[in-house]
Image (cartoon, rainbow, N blue to C red):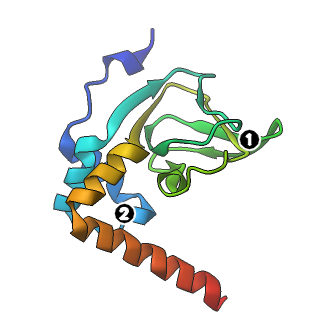
Amino acid sequence: MNTEEHLPELNIVEKVIALEGVDLLSTLTPEQLARIGTIAQEVKYPPNRQVFDPSQPPDGLYVIVDGAVELSRGGEVLTTARQNDVLGAWALFDESDPIPVAARAIEDTRLLRIARDDFYDLLSDNSEITSAIFATLVKRFRKLVEQ
């Protein structure tokens, strides 16, 4: 029996808790995270189902709520992502090329998915969220340049 099917849908508080672990969103307030939580869709994957394909550009960010996702390249396992790990964060900003990594669920897995288009719509209506995210990106870029 698949116990995943019996789990209740995540409420907004549970979504905010999951989103707090996303580095890109780490400077946002709980209220701002709640706005993002309203566009985050819960998706479920059974074992062996592909989360994203290396031949297709990812179209959003995924946060693992529970379960596990195996990341591989050319058949070689790179790592296993688990609860609170994030997949495809840069897909929110870069839609040009596929990422040469496959991701597949290796057990019943529940994720939050933030679609790129929904994210852009949210940013256009919430300049304070846009500013906070760009500040985080600038800090990351600065760290890379200073190394």
Question: What is the spatial separation of the Cα atoms under label 2 and label 1, in whole angstroms?
Answer: 26 Å
Q: Tag 1 or tag 2, which sits nearer the N-term? A: 2
In percent of width and height, residue 73 lies at 78, 43
Most foreground residue, 98 or 49 = 98
Task: Kindly indicate the quadrant of the structure image that contains residue 126.
Answer: bottom left
Q: Quadrant of the C terminus?
A: bottom right
Image side of residue 18 versus residue 75, left or right: left
Instruction: Tell me which amino acid carries mark 1.
Output: Ser
Most foreground residue, 105 or 38 = 38
In percent of width and height, residue 67 lies at 49, 34
User: Which residue is at the far top?
Assistant: 1
Q: Residue at x 49, y 57 (%)?
A: 93
Q: Residue at x 45, y 8 (%)?
A: 1
Secondary element under disc 1, as helix, strand or loop, is: strand
Secondary element under disc 2, as helix, strand or loop, is: helix
Most foreground residue, 33 or 134 = 134
Q: Residue at x 56, y 42 (%)?
A: 58
In percent of width and height, residue 81 lies at 58, 45
Q: Is residue 2 above or below residue 106?
A: above
Q: Residues within 10 Å of mark 1 (few under 14, many from 20)?
A: some
Task: Kindly indicate the quadrant of the structure image that contains residue 132.
Answer: bottom left
Q: Is residue 32 above or below residue 61?
A: below
Disc ID at residue 72: 1
* Residue beneath disc 2: 25
